[in-house]
Image (cartoon, rainbow, N blue to C red):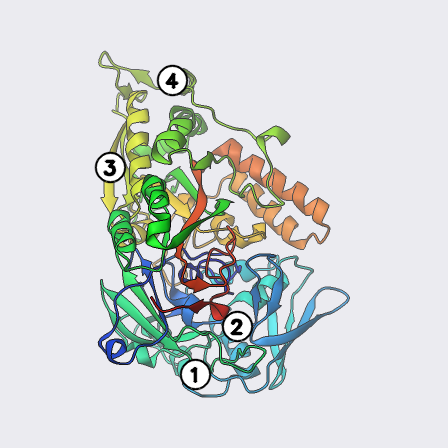
Amino acid sequence: MRLSRLWKMGLLFIAVIVAIALFGRSVLTENSKVNPVSQLVFVSPSDPSTFNAPLNQSAFNIFGFINEGLLTQNGMTTELEPALAESWEISEDKRKIVFTLRKGLQWSDGAPLTADDVVFSYNNVYLNPKVPTGIRDILRVGDGYPSVRKIDDLHVEFTVPEPFAPFLRYAGGISILPKHALEKAVTTTDKNGDLALLTTWGTDTNPQEIVGAGYYRMTDYIPSQRVIFERNPYYWRKDESGNAQPYVEQIILQIIESDETQSIAFRSGELDSLEVRPEAFSLLKKEEKKGKYTIYNGGPASESRFFSLNLCKAKNAQGEPFVDPIKLKWFTDLRFRQAMAHAIDRDRMKNNIYRGLGVVQHSPIGVASPYYFSPEQGLKTYDYDPQKAKDLLLDAGFQYNEDGQLLDADNNLVRFNLLVKSEEKTRVDAAVQIQQDLQAIGVRADLQVLNFNTVIKNLRSRDWEAYVGGFGGGGIEPHSSFNIWYSGGTLHQFNQGQYPGEEPIQDWEVTDWEKEIDRLFQEGAGELDEAKRKEIYGKFQQVVAENVPFLYLVNALSLEAVRDRIQNIKFTSFGGAFWNLYELKAEAD
């Protein structure tokens, strides 16, 4: 689904939730200098990690441009709208959906797109236990999964074992994959028995070989520089006059790691759009008229930033613990986590690092969501209180030496690594402040500032101790974050269980409160009464707040600078500036 910010959409596609951000306009290709085309140039802080959508785990990807689902979501109203499916019908018992595909659909290589592709995408890929995809997490319905069958070339029936509130959004929002291009990859294996799909469509593949059904298709990829897209000539959408959409013929996605360099590129006229970071807001606002752009404000963003500790008690296949047992004993003590929460001055973070352009965040569900449970309603919060932090630590058996350093009961110095990605300045600055705040209560946190793809590898391998991280926008459906909160989910980072296809891990444990979250998510997904669903997800937020697997930091305002030459922008915090990319037009400079 094309929800908010398009290049982030391939991270979960699943829940029709994620967002794009960083966009811009700049470099012309050699061909476009000779034959000018309508184009936009956007920006990403990281290279795509794969061209294979089911295997993607990175927010920074290309799938929002090249893929499409059966349905899409209106970025202003959040209502579902037709995409590859022109209509759908839900049975009275809410357990079946029949989608009717548009006639004459084609893939980006001209091959026909039919119900066979839809059935293949689900039965052979997303629901295939041999495919390590996070999408299967959110398709779980109780102890089972949907069944998908072809009725005829234009009709597909989805059936769930029990009523499932997010069913339509999930079934409609996931990218449909080309059977003719990928069928061989899911029916052949290598010498280790792994599906060929796992090594298909990596970033070393010729971009022109990648087949999709979205607005655009890739033409070129230069690592660490850019990805170039051309309008998909077989895309189905046309305007009322019969003109092909999208109107913009070419997209260039620039790879620029640092926020500061992105800002410089935008101010020099090289980018069409930029996610406005708090530290750059004043300067960009001052230059708004001169630079011929508008800064849009959608209110608090639907994404999150947090501080987390690794609670995984498991060992690898060789019997070695993923987390140092001494540190794990600290991290798994609730009083230690609550002490860390009270030690971090989030108001100072909001005022200094975010320049006041945000709100302190207390919940995994954003304040704009109808499911948000507020402190006023009783949500537990952690005000900045260093003395309370120290009292909690002393109560847990920790002690201080004469230099004010915190020691555990066995006289081990309390010291751990704090991982953060390098590409986002506000996140690095937040990590620096956390380091300072923890030092004030005698705790030493050693910063590990690494590039995003390395951070993802560390998280996946459980090679981390503490982490300043973030997740993309959660949209309006709370179950869209199921693969984060489900104890067996592929993004359950604070206590990561077994990945599909991974060497068996040993001694992994799930706590009672994690099991309670599992239960609440299952109950919430099966409840169709909205008032009762809000009550269920309110309890979920309380469990999270009490046990602090993530301490949420500051929820920044959704700010984006967009060139005035781009027409028909309809900006929202859920949709961003480009959720309706298909109907945008770009005037020549």
Q: Is residue 189 left or right of residue 102?
A: left
Q: Which mark is residue 233?
A: 1
Query: Which one is nearer the viewer's eye here, 29 or 475?
Result: 29
Q: Is residue 439 above or below residue 448?
A: above
Residue 332 screen position, x and y as percent: 41, 33
Check residue 390 in the rendering and tell me which mark sits there, or answer none. 4
Q: CA distance from mark 3 to mark 2?
A: 41 Å
| Disc 3 target residue | 447
Circle 4: residue type: Lys
In 3D space, how far apart are the residues under numbered discs 4 and 3 (Cα atoms)?
Answer: 22 Å
First in residue order: circle 3 vs circle 2? 2
Tell me the crowding category of disc 1: few under 14, some 14 to 19, or many 20 or more residues within 10 angstroms, Cα based: some
Q: Circle 1 sits in a helix, a strand or a loop, which is it? A: loop
Q: Residue at x 49, y 40 (%)?
A: 511
Disc 2: which residue: 122
Q: Position of residue 398 (x, y in %)?
A: 34, 19
Q: Is residue 519 left or right of residue 185?
A: right
Helix, strand or loop at mark 4: helix
Pointer 2 or 1: first along the chain: 2
Between discs 2 and 4, the one toward the N terminus? 2
Sequence-wise first label, 4 or 3:
4
Dot 2 amino acid type: Tyr
Q: Quadrant of residue 189?
A: bottom left
Q: Nearer the viewer, mark 3 or mark 1?
A: 1
Q: Quarter-wise, where is residue 172 in the image?
A: bottom right
